[in-house]
Image (spheres, helix red, strand yellow):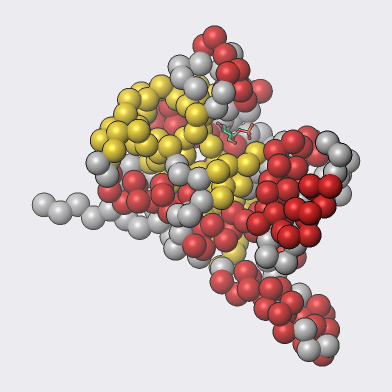
Amino acid sequence: MVVMIPKVHKAVFPAAGLGTRFLPATKAMPKEMLPLVDKPLIQYGVEEAIHSGIQNIIIVTGRGKTAIEDHFDVSFELEQTLEAKGKKDLLAIVRNVSDMINVAYVRQKEALGLGHAVLRVKELVGNEPFAVVLSDDVIDSEIPAIRQLLDVYEFYGASVVALMEVPGDAISSYGAVDAEPVSHNSGKDRLFRIRNMVEKPKPSDAPSNLAIIGRYVLTPDVFASIEAIEPGSGGEIQLTDALKHLLKNRPIYGYRFEGTRYDAGDKLGFLKATVEFALRRYDLGGEFRAYLKQLKL
Ligand code: G1P
């Protein structure tokens, strides 16, 4: 019997967090709109979804996040002005993303955790697998990170989380996994079958230095698990705890993705991403490199 593995059509972007790490910049502006060079963080994630073959975007927002909705909407006045001035290249940039996606918004009334945010999309997602993208984690890779997870999902038909090794005590800022390597594409160092997971463990309690990074492909049974769990780390409903609950009945895989991840939710990570992305830009890279070189560091 051939078992059909349902396709992933939707990507969910939790974006209701308060952005306290970037205050005061995020007092009146969503952290998802902080620009890396000239593109808001969330647009990097949305473009990654598009390049992975997903056009249906669901953004979980909260109060003070209307700038995100405006960003992915048509900006009639701006487009008319650019058109009148003959600025075709800018017009294309402005139109590009909103033309490529169908976007829906769901409101998370209180910031009660990542699991709680994901549960908000239960009705919109329905009985389908879906991707989750945390836009703080910007991943630069040849094959989009979501695509890498989808390839695993499409093979096993089970939930997959992105994994990365982190140094020393850093693991206590992440969900950590206990996982056993699985042979995949003739290699044994990328795919893991997860045995257990812990959200933000003390370094001494961490099962490994393999951290969950903000990309997930989830089967819809995760919703029942989110509903079944109690608040965990930080008093919040954690997605990691829901996945641990799901693990009792379903296999879950972890994939150590290929690429470079920037923690753009952290000031230093954000600065590193800004510098590296600017250096790679054809229109800025040369001059910016020359500027950096002459700094007396
Ligand atoms: C969230 C998840 C955590 C994961 C991290 C990746 O934590 O809860 O499991 O490791 O994203 O960035 P947050 O960074 O929102 O505290």
Q: Which quadrant of the view contains residue 182?
A: top left
The answer to whether any part of residue 277 appears in the image is yes
Q: Residue at image x 63%, y 41%?
A: 262
Which is more toward the observer, 282 or 19?
A: 282
Q: Residue at image x 71%, y 73%?
A: 94
Name the spot of residue 217 as percent of width and height, x first: 43, 46
Q: Which quadrant of the view contains residue 278?
A: bottom right
Name the spot of residue 63 as percent of width and height, x first: 77, 49
Q: As displayed, is residue 63 above or below residue 100?
A: above
Answer with left or right where residue 50 lies relative to residue 235: left
Answer with left or right where residue 275 lies relative to residue 148: right
Q: Residue furthest top?
A: 204
Which is more toward the observer, 167 or 181?
A: 167
Which is more toward the observer, 260 or 14?
A: 260
Q: Residue at image x 80%, y 48%?
A: 292
Q: Residue at image x 45%, y 54%?
A: 143
Answer with left or right where residue 223 lies relative to residue 170: left
